Image: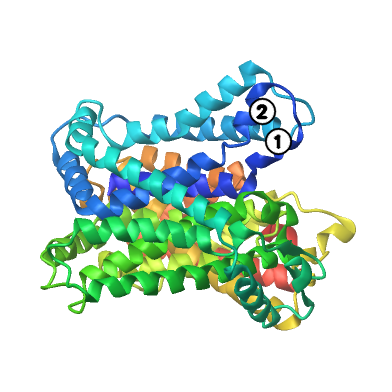
Amino acid sequence: MRCCLLGSLLVLEGIVLGIRFDATLISQVGGPWWNGLLAYAGVVPQLVIATATAAALIGGQRLLTELRRASGTPHQFRSTWPLLVGNFAALVAFALLTRAIFEGSASASAAMVVAWALTGLAVPAFLAAAALPASITPIVLRATGQLLLLAAVVGAAAWGAGTLTAALWEPLRDATLTGVNALLSMIAADALIKPAGFVVGTERFWVTIAPECSGYQGIGMIWVFLGVFLWTFRDTLRFPHALLLIPVATAAVWLANIARITALVVVGSSLSPAIARGGFHSYVGSLLFSAIALSLAWACHRSSFFHKKEPCVETREHKVRVALRDDPTAAYLLPLLAIMATALLAGSVSTSNFDLLYPLRFCAVVGCLWVFRRAYRELRWTWSWHAVAGGVAVFALWLALEPLPVGAQATALPAPLGELPTGLAFAWLAFRVLGTTLTVPVAEELAFRGYLSRRLSSVDFQSLPLRRITWIGLVVSSLLFGAMHQRLLAGTLAGIVYGLAARRRGELSDAVLAHATTNALLAAYVLSTGSWGLWI
């Protein structure tokens, strides 16, 4: 579980950086010889994605087995929080250096390039150190070294095949152009197409379908992946049935490429042309093609049409899924991590402080709560007037301590919301109210009062009654609660009130009720007075 969470964090960080920056821009600057090499920096994430996909296809079960064995080995883990802080610091430094090097007006110095490379390596290094103890890392590498080396070779071959096919073949370009225009016409009223110049898009943003955009790059990659997959599992796959995966995968990749280009135009037209022109198209494409390969392999292993017998790993994987659902730490923390991850993703594609993708946050939290629903046995929903009174008190306290804007800024409707059609604007407001009053209180109280305040009071947090939360646990978790909301004083006092509500009867649902009361009153206040600054 530890490795999965940290690996997911690394993927999220890579997506945000990949969408935000485009390495090819440095080729327009000229300058020292290393600028020419840096122009190919964007290839590295693509190779990493291809290698990871190959490793999952040909040895995913073995990798999981070794990681589970390592996780169960009685070795001392490092303290996680310092390493996560180091990862965050390295990520910030790497992002700042990336912006200075690839988007600066002057050529970067050699020292800056070296610092950029070192901070880039430090980002995954800190997470790797948090995932596995130093004493067993060499053991895991020795057990999986040959597999990882083979995966690197296959990944490089897949990337190379995709590059070659994109450069040599163009017949799919016309069909891709027609497909993108047909799909885009269903979404945008100002869709346009210029077949002579292979241009498609809208009046606000358009793209040229180059050979590498025709779909052959993904097709070349998927053929290599499937070829290796079919050879590796040739003893358990049914032939010639399994060969049908090749045309299915080819069609899936081409259709996915049409959807990718359409999404690129939508992002450029509605959100940010800079993001669309940046790394969005390449990284999203690599992830999309890899996801198709892994999905087909997963479906193939579970299909009696393609597989000779029922997969022998089903029972083991079912046990892993059950163990994950029953993991108390994951159950209490993942809903909050879903909020943070979707907020980070929304911030990376937004040009303002307004979260236009808030419905995605709501859906992500609902999904986490549904997956772990059996772990929330202590959420006994009972009514408490004391909890409601505490929520009302926090609402009054929040308004008293909140530095509200004055004049026209206090009631100005956020521009992105005002630009939406009326139906979509009402839908966004509905999701925002539901998230604020339902999913956010549950997710945050599970993490801060249900887990963190008890974990700071006892190692075995789940067996500690809420009535026995220590003052250290209560205050420290409340301080972190306030820091996360960027309102240290008001947030800390709110966290203490919610914690006291949970301690009074020993019911976590009382903290959720108090929190939901505060947020419901804030939502009513925002909607009735137009104080949108409270939601930004």
Name of the residue lying farthest toward the right: 407
Amino acid type, label 2: Asn
Quarter of the image that includes the C terminus: bottom right
Find residue 124 and report its horizontal and vertical position in percent: 42, 35
Question: How many angstroms separate mark 2 from mark 1 (CA)?
Answer: 7 Å
Q: Amino acid at mark 1?
A: Ser
**Label 2 or label 1, whichever comes before in sequence order:** 1
**Viewed as shown, does residue 322 lie left or right of 35?**
left
Q: Is residue 468 left or right of residue 251?
A: left
Using the rendered image of the protein, determine whether residue 335 is visible from the camera's viewpoint.
Answer: no
Which residue, as the protein is rendered here, is positioned at the far top? 111
Q: Which residue is mark 2?
A: 35
Near mark 1 (Cα within 10 A), the count class, few <14, some 14-19 or many ≥20, is some
Disc sitting over residue 271 in the figure = none
CB atoms of marks 2 and 1 within 8 Å: yes
Task: Please tell me which residue is depicted at 57% across the width and 32% down the height of the picture.
Answer: 94
Is residue 274 found left or right of 387 in the rendered image? right
Q: Which residue is mark 1?
A: 27
Residue depicted at x 22% and y 74%:
240
Q: What residue is shown at x 70% (from left), y 51% (from top)?
A: 402
Image coordinates of residue 187 in percent, x first then y, are 68, 79
| Image position, residue 474 (x, y; %) | 40, 44
